């Protein structure tokens, strides 16, 4: 990458700063807000862990953890494939510049700027990979904790409840990191619009935050989960 040849305007720099503020700020906000969908699901996982403690047959519980792990594994593998594709795209940056500069609705650019934008996408996807990878471990650890909980016939509901709740907490941690990885996908898709124009990028980033906020705090899913509780 020829960083000295970057052609970033003040608007491009503002768009990049806006992206970082929205991504980091919203992630911190939603992960620490007790009214979010994620917080509500923590309560349901706590219920699940206590219900599991009263069951002799825990095949369903193990299948739930396996299903969660399979979903995370799929996205983890997808992150690797997309990252590999982005590295290949960086090798074809000259062709990308030619195509971009020929399109009237896209901002003119050069090789260094295209490589920098593709590099940002790579960073986002690598971040998502680490999040998904850690989520896989946490779901796997929750399965081990579940296996260590005595069955309903020998379990002491008071003594073993804490161990059962630990399974739910580990599963919630895995879900939180999975959500962080999925959120990175949203912002990665929004970052593609930066190739068009920084104002479009700012608008798309803002729209993504609004969509995420609606799903995390105003969705019908959250409403139904709250009604039952």
Image (tube, rainbow, N blue to C red):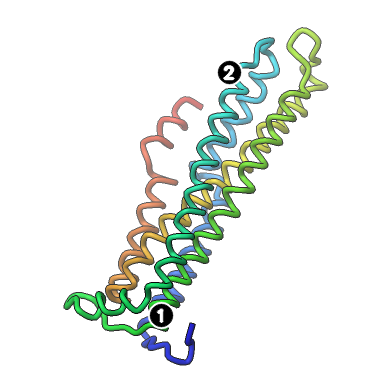
Badge number at residue 110: none
Name the side, left or right, on which 73 lies relative to 117: right
Q: Position of residue 147 (x, y in %)?
A: 74, 23
According to the picture, the residue beneath numbered tag 1 turns out to be: 14
Q: Quadrant of residue 91?
A: bottom left
Mark 2, Cα crowd under 10 Å, few <14 / some 14-19 / many 20+, is few
In depth, the one of 2 and 136 nearer the eye is 2
Q: Position of residue 55 (x, y in %)?
A: 67, 12
Q: Position of residue 15 (x, y in %)?
A: 39, 76
Mark 1, Cα crowd under 10 Å, few <14 / some 14-19 / many 20+, is some
Callout in the foreground (1, 2): 2
Q: Position of residue 69 (x, y in %)?
A: 57, 35
User: Outermost residue toward the bottom?
Assistant: 4
User: In the rendered image of this protein, does residue 171 appear above or below residue 189?
Assistant: above
Element marked by disc 2: helix
Nearest to N terminus: mark 1 or mark 2: 1
The residue at the point 69 percent across, 10 percent down is 56
Q: CA distance from mark 1 to mark 2?
A: 50 Å
Badge number at residue 60: 2
């Amino acid at each position: 990458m020829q960083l000295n040849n970057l052609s970033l305007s003040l608007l491009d720099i503002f768009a990049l700063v806006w992206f970082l503020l929205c991504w980091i700020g919203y992630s911190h906000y939603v992960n620490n807000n007790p009214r979010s969908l994620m917080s509500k699901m923590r309560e349901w996982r706590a219920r699940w862990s206590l219900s599991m403690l009263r069951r002799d047959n825990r095949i369903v519980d193990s299948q739930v953890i396996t299903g969660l792990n399979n979903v995370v594994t799929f996205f983890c593998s997808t992150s690797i494939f997309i990252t590999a594709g982005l590295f290949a795209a960086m090798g074809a940056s000259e062709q990308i510049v030619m195509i971009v500069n020929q399109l009237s609705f896209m901002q003119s650019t050069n090789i260094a700027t295209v490589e920098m934008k593709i590099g940002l996408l790579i960073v986002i996807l690598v971040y998502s990979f680490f999040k998904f990878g850690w989520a896989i471990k946490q779901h796997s650890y929750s399965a081990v904790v579940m296996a260590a909980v005595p069955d309903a016939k020998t379990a002491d509901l008071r003594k073993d409840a804490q161990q059962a709740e630990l399974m739910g907490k580990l599963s919630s941690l895995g879900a939180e990191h999975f959500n962080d990885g999925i959120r990175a996908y949203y912002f990665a898709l929004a970052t593609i619009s930066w190739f068009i124009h920084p104002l479009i990028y700012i608008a798309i980033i803002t729209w993504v935050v609004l969509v995420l906020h609606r799903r995390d705090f105003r969705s019908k899913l959250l409403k139904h989960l709250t009604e039952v509780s």
